[in-house]
Image (cartoon, rainbow, N blue to C red):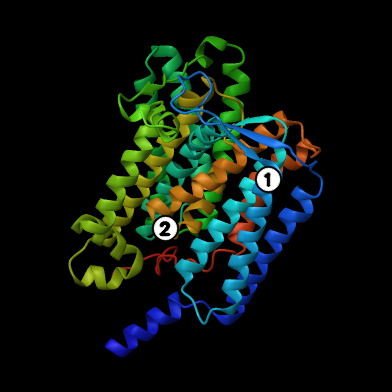
């Protein structure tokens, strides 16, 4: 048994020689691209200035000024060196390969920023601050998917749940002048959709992809109708306002990272809390073990006395409540009003973040940060007036999503029994 277990872990963790060569070639290619795309067009002697404190805040650290060309040469050499090392080393582990991939990707992105801001100034801290804000609904949506799919229920209805919750939370907050009541109604809206998804998937054993798609279509239709029929005619029910930023004492004064991480509205802090709580709950408690067992080995769980049906209902509803909370962010945490189809596919990107993060809370947070960064980067690049069509900048977050889902980071391991209806024998 020990030999079998060891062999299994080797099959999962060891990188194949083909993947190792492909990754090595990719790293070298990125290094060459830094030279070809970023270094060649620059004039000698140019410098890049990065702001290290978000706009509107007291500076905790001075701006950083670097020589553009020298920095790009260094980044190019690092990428090529890591690529050569990847090619010549014997064997490798998937985690270390993905870590190097992330490092090289970071070098490439920093090189791009250095090139784009050469002779200009770019607020790097502000860019990261916006990235975290844009990562909030993606991360919360990914957590919604984790709760549902870890219990065995595929939830592709996150988009629809978020959209409906964005609308209901806005209406209630506008009518009652209470943002917190709006949040509660948004969460309850998600719970209602979760119950529908659970009944369709568990009781009637409807294909879970179809039932999720139906919820998405219904949500798009009903929110668009209510918005056009009522919210445009009565604008007073579409003026919810937003939660203010809360600056945490001491923590917000930490140079660079303090203003980025600890001067935000309650949704950002709630995301931090949910990440820790769900990680502990899923992997260090009996409740989490039972939830995961319903998605991995439901028959074995049933044999041990776990009510698989009830556990799956719980997972579907809790996940939908998280999606409802994520949806309320769009109106109460971002723009203060509802617009038709304002989620703009973020629910599907959240699913991509969940897969990218291997159904793990902090892994999904990392993926959410990646997608949020590309979204924030698109708007920043427009300000820098680079010669890139705005349409391509708007496509950037979705291109990154497709690249990730194409398997660049390797295979992800979904819960074994997700999507499979359970019939008690």
Point 39% across, 56% down: residue: 360
Point 63% across, 54% down: residue: 75
Q: Does 308 appear above or below 38?
A: below
- The answer to which of marks 1 and 2 sits earlier in the sequence is 1
**Cα separation between marks 1 and 2:** 30 Å
* Residue denoted by label 2: 359
136, 328: nearer the viewer: 136
Q: Does 312 appear above or below 277?
A: below
Q: Does 212 appear above or below 290?
A: above
Q: Does 153 appear above or below 423?
A: above
- Answer left or right for 391 relative to 96: right
Q: Residue 286: x and y, percent?
A: 19, 58
Q: Residue 9: x and y, percent?
A: 38, 79
Q: In which quadrant of the rendered view does residue 186 lie?
A: top left
Q: In which quadrant of the rendered view does residue 260 lie?
A: top left
Q: Which disc is residue 112 wearing?
A: 1
Screen quadrant of the C terminus:
bottom left
């Amino acid at each position: 048994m020990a030999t079998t277990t060891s062999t299994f872990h080797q099959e999962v963790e060891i990188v194949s020689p083909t993947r190792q060569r492909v990754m090595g070639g990719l790293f070298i290619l990125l290094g060459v691209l830094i030279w070809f795309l970023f270094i060649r067009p620059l004039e000698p002697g140019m410098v890049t200035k990065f702001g290290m404190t978000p706009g509107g805040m007291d500076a905790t650290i001075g701006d950083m000024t670097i020589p553009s060309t020298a920095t790009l040469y260094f980044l190019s050499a690092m990428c090529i060196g890591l690529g050569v090392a990847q090619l010549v080393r014997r064997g490798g582990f998937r985690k270390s390969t993905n870590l190097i991939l992330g490092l090289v990707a970071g070098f490439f992105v920093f090189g791009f920023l250095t090139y784009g801001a050469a002779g200009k100034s770019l607020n790097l801290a502000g860019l990261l601050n916006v990235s975290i804000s844009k990562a909030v609904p993606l991360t919360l949506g990914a957590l919604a998917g984790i709760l549902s799919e870890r219990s065995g229920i595929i939830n592709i209805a996150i988009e629809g749940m978020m959209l409906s919750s964005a609308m209901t939370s806005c209406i209630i907050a506008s009518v009652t002048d209470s943002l917190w009541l709006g949040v509660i109604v948004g969460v309850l809206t998600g719970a209602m959709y979760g119950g529908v998804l659970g009944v369709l998937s568990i009781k009637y054993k409807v294909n879970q992809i179809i039932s999720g798609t139906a919820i998405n279509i219904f949500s798009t239709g009903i929110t668009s109708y209510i918005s056009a029929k009522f919210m445009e005619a009565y604008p007073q029910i579409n003026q919810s306002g937003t939660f203010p930023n809360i600056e945490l004492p001491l923590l917000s004064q930490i140079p660079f990272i303090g203003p980025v991480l600890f001067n935000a509205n309650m949704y950002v802090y709630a995301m931090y809390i949910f990440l820790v709580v769900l990680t502990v709950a899923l992997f260090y408690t009996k409740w989490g073990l039972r939830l995961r067992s319903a998605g991995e080995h439901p028959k074995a769980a049933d044999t041990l006395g776990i009510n698989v049906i009830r556990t799956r209902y719980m997972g579907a509803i809790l996940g939908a409540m998280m999606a409802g909370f994520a949806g309320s962010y769009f109106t109460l945490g971002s723009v203060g009003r509802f617009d038709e189809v304002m989620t703009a596919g973020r629910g599907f990107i959240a699913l991509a973040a969940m897969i990218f993060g291997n159904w793990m809370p902090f892994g999904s947070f990392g993926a959410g940060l990646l997608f949020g960064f590309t979204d924030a980067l698109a708007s920043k690049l427009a300000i820098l007036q680079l010669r890139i069509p705005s349409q391509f900048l708007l496509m950037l977050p979705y291109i990154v999503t497709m690249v990730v889902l194409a398997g660049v980071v390797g295979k992800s391991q979904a819960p074994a029994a997700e999507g499979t209806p359970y019939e008690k024998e």
